[in-house]
Image (cartoon, rainbow, N blue to C red):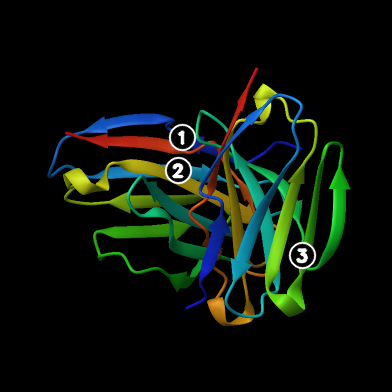
Amino acid sequence: GIQVEQSPPDLILQEGANSTLRCNFSDSVNNLQWFHQNPWGQLINLFYIPSGTKQNGRLSATTVATERYSLLYISSSQTTDSGVYFCAVGWVGSNYKLTFGKGTLLTVNP
Amino acid sequence: KAGVTQTPRYLIKTRGQQVTLSCSPISGHRSVSWYQQTPGQGLQFLFEYFSETQRNKGNFPGRFSGRQFSNSRSEMNVSTLELGDSALYLCASSLVGTGLNEQYFGPGTRLTVT
């Protein structure tokens, strides 16, 4: 099956700093999503981005499908950005399931 | 539009018992998937239903089963609970297919097996 690797596994920032999270995947994908898991466990949709670039406020994401990676940018980080960020991919051969990376644990200190 | 809802939110069961979890998808969504999240294994796919039919199943024992009703609501059942079944169970819905369409997750059911 497809492999999804996220880096770094852990990231500690001071409030106001910028960060880049990376997601590498081992095969062509038809679906790529970024999620933020809140302290209560819910996965919050950030981006649906199988290719291209999208922006939403302080967050933006870029997926380069031909090179099999995606980047999530967080600018001017806030303490509320803390949590685990997951990348998940789906593809035609996956029979409708998403495969998740292990996540990046982001801690933003005041 | 209301999001994905899951009930109950928390559950404590004893080894050997069985449990049923419920998921109501976003209105109009016909695909429902279930995932298990544990600290050791991360997020793992359990199964996916579309129009009351299971289309895909992950690598879990037969104690894990599910079904989908005509209104797209889904239930999953775990029989003969084991300590290792303690996990956060997440349900996701999408319009037609989880691998090819954006998925939206519910708040999860946290199951503790003692």
At label 2, which amino acid type do we have?
Answer: Ser
**Marks 1 and 2, Cα distance to the nearest angstrom?**
5 Å
Taking the spot 17% from the left edge, 47% from the top edge, the residue there is B82
Q: Earlier in the sequence, mark 1 or mark 2?
A: 1
Quadrant (top left, top right, bottom left, bottom right) of the C terminus of chain B: top left
The answer to whether dots 1 and 2 both sit on one chain is yes
Give the x, y percent position of residue A27. Answer: 61, 80
Taking the spot 67% from the left edge, 75% from the top edge, the residue there is A29
Q: Secondary structure at mark 2?
A: strand
Residue placed under numbered mark 1 in the picture: B7
Frontmost of labels 3 and 1 is 3
Residue B67 is left or right of residue B114, and the answer is right
**Marks 3 and 1, Cα distance to the nearest angstrom?**
35 Å
Residue placed under numbered mark 3 in the picture: A63
At label 3, which amino acid type do we have?
Answer: Thr
Q: Nearer the viewer, residue A86 or B57?
A: A86
Q: Is residue B86 above or below residue A91?
A: above
Residue B68 is left or right of residue A21, and the answer is left
Q: Secondary structure at mark 3?
A: strand
Residue placed under numbered mark 2 in the picture: B22
Classify 10 Å Cα crowding around label 3: few (below 14), some (14-19), many (20 and above): many
Q: Secondary structure at mark 1?
A: strand
**Marks 3 and 2, Cα distance to the nearest angstrom?**
34 Å
Give the x, y percent position of residue A84. Answer: 55, 40
At label 1, which amino acid type do we have?
Answer: Thr
Residue B77 is left or right of residue B44, and the answer is left
Q: Nearer the viewer, residue A37 or B71?
A: A37
